[in-house]
Image: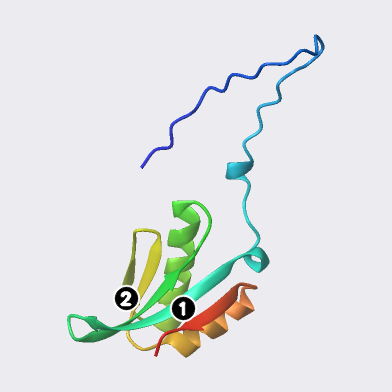
């Protein structure tokens, strides 16, 4: 999904005013500043899955984190709707990996 570039209109009475167009949205957010929610879901086709919600960043960063988690846990998974879905009951291992990477997390659900 592409973000639309918005053209803003700025009115000023200062004749020396210069509009500085900086996109603060594109700045990367440190892992320490994020709070991820680590859910466990036992209803996905009768199998257990771990869902990580609340990641703030680009889709490429989300996919990189997903690949790292799947590789270290030795399981499959996917990225859908801004969430990382990891197959299997590996929530404790995922929380260890997230804490090693500096992410703050919150254990949610059963």
Residue at image location 23% in from the left, 82% down from the top? 43
Residue 102 lies, with reference to residue 49, above or below; the image says above
| Residue 101 placement (x, y as % from top left) | 61, 73
Q: Secondary structure at mark 2?
A: loop
Colour approach in the figure: rainbow
Which quarter of the rendering shows the N terminus? top left
Residue 94 lies, with reference to residue 67, above or below; the image says below
Q: Is residue 88 left or right of residue 13?
A: left
Q: Residue furthest top?
A: 15
Numbered mark located on residue 19 in the image: none
The front one of 9 and 61 is 9
Q: Residue furthest front?
A: 13
Residue at image location 42% in from the left, 83% down from the top? 73
Other-residue count near label 1 (Cα within 10 Å), few / some / many at <14 / 14–19 / ≥20: many
Other-residue count near label 2 (Cα within 10 Å), few / some / many at <14 / 14–19 / ≥20: some
**Quarter of the image where one finds residue 18:** top right
| Residue 78 placement (x, y as % from top left) | 32, 67
Residue, disc 1: 38
Q: Gap in Å between the C-alphas at discs 1 and 2?
A: 16 Å
Which quarter of the rendering shows the C terminus? bottom left
| Residue 25 placement (x, y as % from top left) | 58, 43
Q: Is residue 110 left or right of residue 68?
A: left
Residue at image location 46% in from the left, 75% down from the top? 69
**Quarter of the image where one finds residue 2:** top left
Numbered mark located on residue 76 in the image: 2
Q: Secondary structure at mark 1?
A: strand
| Residue 107 placement (x, y as % from top left) | 50, 83
């Amino acid at each position: 999904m592409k973000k639309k570039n918005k053209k803003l209109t700025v009115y000023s009475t200062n004749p020396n005013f210069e509009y500085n167009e900086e996109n603060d949205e594109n700045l990367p957010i440190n892992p320490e500043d994020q709070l991820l929610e680590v859910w466990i879901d036992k209803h996905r086709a009768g199998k257990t899955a771990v869902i990580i919600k609340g990641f703030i960043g680009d889709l490429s960063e989300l996919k990189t984190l997903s690949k790292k988690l799947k590789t270290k846990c030795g399981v499959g998974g996917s990225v859908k709707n801004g969430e990382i879905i990891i197959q299997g009951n590996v929530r404790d291992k995922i929380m260890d990996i997230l804490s090693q990477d500096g992410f703050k997390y919150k254990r949610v659900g059963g």
